[in-house]
Image: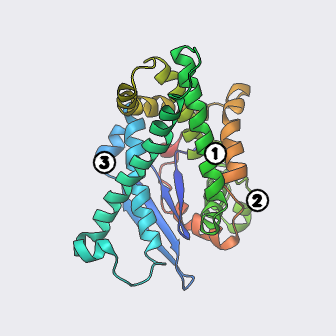
Amino acid sequence: MKKTTIGGQALIEGILMRGPSKYSIAVRKPDQEIDLVVKDLENNKINLMKIPFIRGVVSLFDSMKLGMDALMYSASFYEDDSENFFDKHFKNNARKVENVFSIIASVALALLFFFFIPTFLTSFVKLNHSSFSFNLIEGMIRIIIFFAYLFIVSHSKDMKRVFEYHGAEHKSIYCYEQGLDLTVENVRKQSRLHPRCGTSFLFTVMIISILVLGLVGWPNPLMRMLYRIILLPVIVSISYEINRLIGKYDNTITALLVKPGLWVQKYFTVREPDDKMIEVAILALKSVIPEKEDEDLW
């Protein structure tokens, strides 16, 4: 079975698909028609994605920007016409400023909940442990927060539909990788769980962070916070390369390594889609499939 580098993201009533040279955004509008946008990726980013360890950081921040832009675009079909804060103060640049603000806020919240709060709570542990033990405890708190977050969002009515579109994205990619025609019937039969999902990457990041941060000891609180910010690109880069390596091979070891990610998908982030969602996924995927068959190999 072919393994493709094409990946996607579920949106508000839509799907973002990213191929080796272009990306697409397909959204089911309120009138039930599908809006499709297809654009080329920037060449300099394509070249950077070929450099090991550098590509991990580039991929993360580019995915955040592209994902946020796509999310805002899909939401624009379902928001009311009233003027919000950004429309009022930034006029023609409102969407661009809103996207930048959303990215900054997302990064800040991620650092707060997954780095600062865990290290702050671990500071109250008074047992005579080694520095690595403290980092291990911090990592466990981080994982607990992660699952608590997933539990909360998975019970949101709006997020349930997003997770269903997530399932449509996975099914369509699986169908493509098996060389089958991209029809609703063929896609519907595929598994909604995919071993190379971004959920697995996030889980890998949390595990790698325990190992990397364990190397810098357990200094004073200010230095701990600083180390976590400085080492974040290193953690992301290592996690990205490990995920690429795991995704490249099929054996007992890699099967075990992808299990946690599949479990998270099964119980939290991926649901069975309906046929209309599958239609959106197929259209988005077809728009980014490269002409050369080997151009999108994993």
The quarter in which the C terminus is drawn is top right
Identify the residue position indicated by label 1 in the image: 147
Reading the chain from its start, which is encountered first: label 3 or label 1?
Answer: 3
Reading the chain from its start, which is encountered first: label 2 or label 1?
Answer: 1
Q: Is residue 52 above or below residue 27?
A: above
- The image position of residue 54, as x and y in percent, is 37, 33
Front residue of this view, candidates 219 and 153: 219
Task: Determine whether the residue tagged by mark 2 lies in a helix, strand or loop.
Answer: loop
What label does residue 259 carry, if any? none
Q: Is residue 170 above or below residue 116?
A: below
Residue 200 quadrant: top right
Reading the chain from its start, which is encountered first: label 3 or label 2?
Answer: 3
Marks 3/2: CA–CA distance: 36 Å
What label does residue 189 carry, if any? 2
Identify the residue position indicated by label 3 in the image: 43
Marks 2/1: CA–CA distance: 29 Å
Q: Is residue 158 above or below residue 179?
A: below
| Left or right for 115, reference 51 | right
Marks 3/1: CA–CA distance: 37 Å
